[in-house]
Image: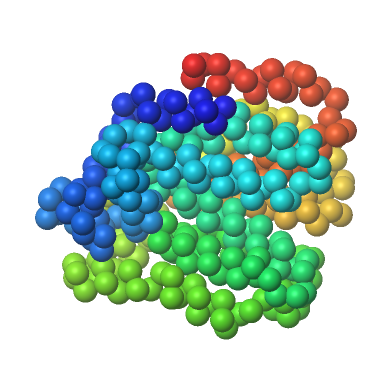
Amino acid sequence: LIVLRGFLNAIVPLMDKTEARYAEIARIMQETNNYITPQIDYGVPFWAKPPLSTWLSALSMEVFGVNEFAVRLPYLLATIFILFVVSKFVESRRACLVCAFVLLTIPEFLLHAGVVSTDTFLALCVAMVFLSFWQTILIEKVNHWHYLFYVFLGFGLLAKGPIVFILTIPPLFIFTLYFKQFKTFFKNTPLFSGLLLMLLIAVPWYYLAEQETKGFLEYFIIGEHFKRFFDSDGWDGDKYGFAKTQPWVFLFAFAFPWIQVLAVKLWKLRQEILKNKWVSFLLLWLLWAPFFFTFSSSLIHTYILSSIVPIALLISHYWPNYKHKRLALRLSLIFPVLVV
């Protein structure tokens, strides 16, 4: 499936106006060598998104040339990185393979292993924040996981902005509140050095971007994160999205068939969910993004991408006792076969 995705990345032309837009922004960045201000056209700044994914696409084109494979390569590598990290949170090699297979057969995830956008790297950052948090409450002695929590909050600010806080902090707060983990987390986490590290990663670019093009911060913070969320019709900035479509529709359509398999399993075991910390943790992670975007007046299907990793981890968790394995595996191959 990874080889298939890489092959398609090379031979399929840039697909829609969004992918073409971000690819062109990266191409201009690579050509002009201006890594501070992304440009939608020569001399026209693109303020709508931070530059992490654009940086990586531009650097990839610097190495491999200006072509579809190069501009999409960072997204394929991000996908492989997610598969590698998630494998550390399952119990066996079989569970690892199941988890990776589930991820790569979820349409939304397989699609974004080769789509030029900001959402893949936001999803990666969200996943790393959640998984690092889990390790922080489990491990007392400070190690790399404790710092990765803050590192990927910083990268999240560079991937898509303050939305990384909105997609992670509230569900983590609810989890710590319900399972009484506040003391454990704040005892184990390197709070001050971690926050400093996060700021050192993110703040320099925001400062330089504002100095380079005055008005960026007001446009990006107020416009993109408040006006667009609450009043997309009145927002004059970077417009896209479908105001009347619910994220739950996207979730059940673009995570087929695994979200349906999981929903049935969780319903049958609903009495046990809150008794299992790991299951509750993953379920909060899964449900938070669609819940949050239910209230948004601007919505696209990519907003459910951050919910995909917990689906795979939950399927992997329940897989040994799942009765209809063969049917689920066959159904899951429908989308890859259609892609071919």
Identify which residue is drawn at 54% across, 31% down: 2
Q: Can the viewer see residue 253? A: no
Identify which residue is drawn at 55% across, 21% down: 336
The percent coordinates of residue 77 (x first, y second) are 49, 43
Please state which of residues 83 and 218 is positioned toward the viewer in this rendering.
Answer: 83
Identify which residue is drawn at 81% across, 46% down: 91
Which colour scheme appears in the figure? rainbow
Please state which of residues 145 and 112 is positioned toward the viewer in this rendering.
Answer: 145
The percent coordinates of residue 13 (x first, y second) are 31, 26
Residue 97 to residue 310: above or below: above
Identify which residue is drawn at 43% across, 45% down: 74
> Which quadrant of the figure has residue 11?
top left
Residue 138 to residue 72: above or below: below
The percent coordinates of residue 275 (x first, y second) are 86, 54
Residue 23 to residue 189: above or below: above
The quadrant of the image that shows the N terminus is top right
* Residue found at the far bottom of this picture: 192
Residue 270 to residue 209: above or below: above
In the picture provided, is 191 more to the left or to the right than 135?
left
* Residue found at the far front of this picture: 63
In the picture provided, is 92 more to the left or to the right than 307?
right
* Residue found at the far left of this picture: 43
Q: Can the viewer see residue 271? A: yes
> Which quadrant of the figure has residue 146?
bottom right
The percent coordinates of residue 286 (x first, y second) are 64, 47
Number of marks drawn: 0
